[in-house]
Amino acid sequence: MADTGTGTTPRERYRAQVRTEIKDHAWQQIATAGASALSLNAIAKQMGLSGPALYRYFANRDELITALIRDAYRSLADTFRAAAESPGADVTALAHALRGWAIEDPQRYFLIYGTPVPGYHAPDDVTTIASEIMTTLLDAYAAELPAVGPETPQFDEHLADHRQWADGHPAPPATLHRALSFWTRMHGVLSLELAGHFTGMEFDPALLFTAELDELT
Amino acid sequence: MADTGTGTTPRERYRAQVRTEIKDHAWQQIATAGASALSLNAIAKQMGLSGPALYRYFANRDELITALIRDAYRSLADTFRAAAESPGADVTALAHALRGWAIEDPQRYFLIYGTPVPGYHAPDDVTTIASEIMTTLLDAYAAELPAVGPETPQFDEHLADHRQWADGHPAPPATLHRALSFWTRMHGVLSLELAGHFTGMEFDPALLFTAELDELT
DNA sequence: AGGTTTCGTTAGAGGCTATCACTCAATCTA
DNA sequence: TAGATTGAGTGATAGCCTCTAACGAAACCT
C-alpha cells in the first residue's frame, strides 16, 4: 500500500516494509476502535514483537498517527484525482468518489476531518496534499459550464480580495465560492452520516447527499 | 451550571454539587486538551482528592463523558430554543445562535458532532434532546413563508415516505428537506472552521457561513 | 446515642507510553 | 574474508492512566 520498494539497500527495504506493516495493523485498530484507542503496545504484540521495538520505526505515537494522516490525505488526493481524470468526469463524479472513499473507511475520513486535537499542527507536506485536493476540485469546476448558480455578491467580493489560498488558480471568485460550498456541503452530509447522526431517522443518506449535490449544480 | 439545588437531603445536595464541580474541571480539561486527554486522576488532583474518590460520583470515565455529552446537548437545545422564542426570530437567528454556541467552546461542539467512538451508543435521553433540537428547527421553518426553495422532487418524495423521525410534525416534505439541509450545511461550514481547515486560507469563515445561510433562504 | 449509610483513603492489579542499557545479527569496509 | 560498525530487538524500569477492593472515619437518620 506504500512505497515499500523505494529503498536501495536491503536494510532500507526491510525498514520500509516493517513500517507499512505497522501502519496496516494501526489502520485495522483504528477502523474497529477509533484512533484514540490506537496502542503501539497492542500492535507490537500482534506482530510478535516487544513493545519498545516499534520505537525504532516511529519516534512516538504521535508520529505514527501523523504518518497515518499523511497516508489518508494521499489516498484521498489520489482517488480524487483519479476520479477527475477519468473520461467524462464532472463535479458530481468527484462527489461520488469522495463519498465512496469516505464510506470505505469512516475512521480514515475522521482522521482528516474529525475532531481536532487542540495542540496538534499538521506538518507542511500534509497541507500541501490538502491544497492539491482543492486544486483538483477547482480544475473540475473551471472545466464546467460557466457558473449559473445563485448570486452571492457579498462573499464573492470578499473572495476576490482573499484568494491567496487558491494558489494562483485563474478561476473567478464565483468558482472559488462554488468549490468551497462543494467542500462544506459534502462534508456536512458525509460527516453527520458517518458519525451516525442519521441512524434513528429512516431516510436514505445517499439521497440526501445527491439532493445536496444537485442543488450545487 | 446544573441542577445543584434539586436534591432534598443535604447529602444529595452535596453529591450534586461535587458532581458539577467534577464536570466543570472536566470541561476545562476538554477545552484545552480535547476529550481524549480527559483524565479522572488529574481532575481528582485538581480538586485535592485522591484518584479513586471520583468513582463515588461517576462509575467510570465513559459515564462522565456521557454526562458531559448530555449537558452539551441540553445546552445546545436551550440556546436553540431561546433563540427561536426571542421576538422576531427567524431561521437565520437560529443559525447565528448555533454558530455562537459552537464558537464559544469548539470542543463542546465536537463532543456532539465530532469523531464518533465506534463502540459508543448514546443513551435514550440524549437522543430525545437531539430530536427536541430538530423539532425547534422544524417549527421555525414551518413558521416561515411557504418554502420557495429549489425543487428537489426526488428526495422530497422519499421523505414523504420516511418522515418517522419528524415525530408527527405536520410540516410538508419540502420543509423537512430544508431543515435537513440547514443542519448539514451549517454543520459543514462550522465543523471545518472549528477544526481549523480554513486557517491557512485567508477568507473570513463567518462570511462563508452567512453566504451558505443566504442560499438556504 | 447507636446503627447505618456514604465518603474518602491507601494499596494494588493491569494497561499504556516512552527511555535505557544491553545482546546479537546484519551490513559495510579494508 | 576478518574485523569494525551499524542497527534491530530485548528486558527492566519509570511514570502515567483506569478501575477494584478493603478499610477508617465522618455524616446522617431514628
Image (tube, coloured by chain):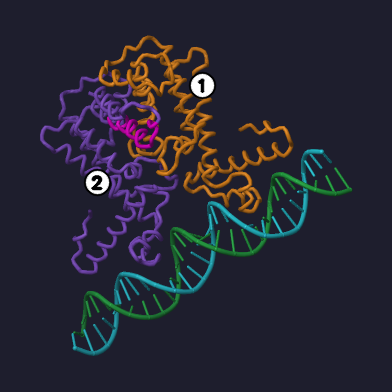
Chain colours: A purple, B orange, C green, D cyan
Instruction: Give the quarter of the image for residue A20.
Output: bottom left
* Nearer-the-camera pick, A119 or A190: A190
Magenta residues (range): A182-199
Q: Same chain for marks 1 and 2?
A: no
Q: Main secondary structure of the magenta part?
A: helix
- Secondary structure beneath dot 2 equals helix
Q: Would you say A110 lies left or right of D14 here?
A: left
In 3D space, how far apart are the residues under numbered discs 1 and 2 (Cα atoms)? 42 Å
Q: Tell me the number on the disc at residue B81.
A: 1
**Residue A58 sits above or below residue A138 on the image:** below
Where residue B156 appears, as percent x and y from the top left, is: 30, 18
**Residue B133 sits above or below residue B50 on the image:** above
Which quarter shows the N terminus of chain B? top right
> Residue extending furthest top?
B145
What amino acid does circle 2 point to? Ser
Where residue B16 appears, as percent x and y from the top left, is: 65, 37
Q: Tell me the number on the disc at residue A75.
A: 2
